[in-house]
Amino acid sequence: MKIITFFNHKGGVAKTTNCYHLGWKLAEKGKRVILVDADSQCNLTGLAMGLMPNDYSSEVEDAEKNGDDGKASELLEKIEREESEIVKRADNFWRSVKTNNIHSALRPAFKAEPRPLEPVEVVPVPGNENLLLLPGHIELADYESDLALAQNVKGSIGSQQNIPGAISHLLNITGEKYGADYLLVDVSPSLGAINQNIVSISDEIIIPCAPDYFSMMALMSLKEILPKWKSWALEAARSKGLQQAVYKFPEPKFRVLGLTISRFVMYKGKPASAFAAWIDKIQRACIEELKPAMQEADILSEVTKTEESPFIMAKIRDFNSLRPKSQEAQKPVFALTDEDLGLSGRSLQNMIKQREQADQVFERFADLVIESK
């Protein structure tokens, strides 16, 4: 069983989308996968369970540009109707997992309650029998300060000793209960204690990026941050106080598996020039700076050490009009059927082409993950 975390402290880099799509593809290949929502925004839970409002903004814009007021009005009414239905569905779902989510499951350790941590009753993801969800919770962020205090290894005493190892213990006993091959963890865009902990107890890290200046800045900071977190985790695992804990903090073994680059537009079969320039810059930065830093800190996966397997694991174009179709059908873009697309003629053919491209990208992405040892 492997714990793989999608981590970047920059937001808007498709962490949640890529986590969901990779999980589905691994499950298609016969792997037992648990999606773990460790972001208090709970977007992975919403995406997996169909609780996200569909985005028809581009279709409304196109209708208005074409002067089709009737179509635009029809779409706006559809948005209002679907949002009302989603609110009801979301309310029912959150009631059903009120005591069955990552926040509630960790409560005994963080609140020093006299009961052990127990595996979470995961939720089946609709449409894929091998894919399960460990739901998130908006109040998970409340544990941030407690964890930060407990992770001061020189001052962690008493019941605080059980906090740093609690997340690792919970994920492992949950994964073991369901015979999971992979736990894919979606985290918030931050450098807080929860993310530091989850990265440190993971087996592998995938760094999602976008082709822009701020992603480049984030990568340059991560080449310093990840080695520091490895050093901290080594100290924590070997500290006398945490060794005496009920939930021991594990010896860190995380490796950076590679990057994904998402959120770019295609033009004539290639990334549009503005995006292509940033993709090239990020690739060079990975080869010249990030990869050597990860190797020096001994946190680079064997898969990405070889020349045959690039550090960039997947380049994932913007899904454009496939995104609302995906949310409406509650499945990834590459799993959409022609009927799900609901189009004909040239529009259908264009979407089929995009769907096939997405399938090829995530097929290769999943194979690289499976190849990692």
Image (tube, helix red, strand yellow):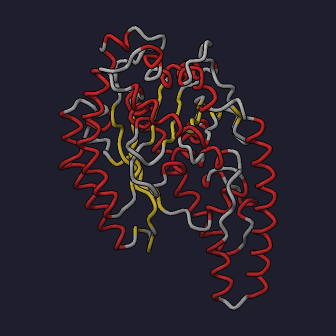
Residue at image location 69% in from the left, 91% down from the top: 67
Looking at the picture, tell me which residue is in the foreground, 319 or 91: 91
Query: Percent from the top left, x then y, of residue 113?
Result: 60, 17
Vertical order, 339 against 131 (above or below): below
Instruction: Estimate the x, y position of residue 219 in percent, counting from the top left.
Output: 29, 50
Number of marks in picture: 0
- Residue in the foreground of this view, choosing between 200 and 254: 200
Q: Residue 312, position in %: x, y?
A: 34, 49
Q: Is residue 300 above or below residue 45?
A: above
Quick check: 151 above or below 62? above
Q: Pick out the residue farthest to the top.
A: 244
Which residue sits at x=32%, y=10%? 240
* Residue furthest bottom as drawn: 67
Q: Along the horizontal axis of the image, is 53 left or right of 26? A: right
Instruction: Please tell me which residue lies in front, 128 or 42.
Output: 42
For residue 77, above or below residue 373: below
Q: From the viewer's perspective, is 336 left or right of 81?
A: left
Residue shown at 71% from the left, 51% from the top: 51
Dividing the picture into quadrants, the one containing residue 282 is bottom left
Where does the image place residue 114, in percent across and percent down from the top left?
A: 61, 12
Residue at 37% across / 19% down in the picture? 156
Q: Quadrant of residue 131?
A: top right
Who is closer to the viewer here, 303 or 281? 281
Screen quadrant of the C terminus: top left
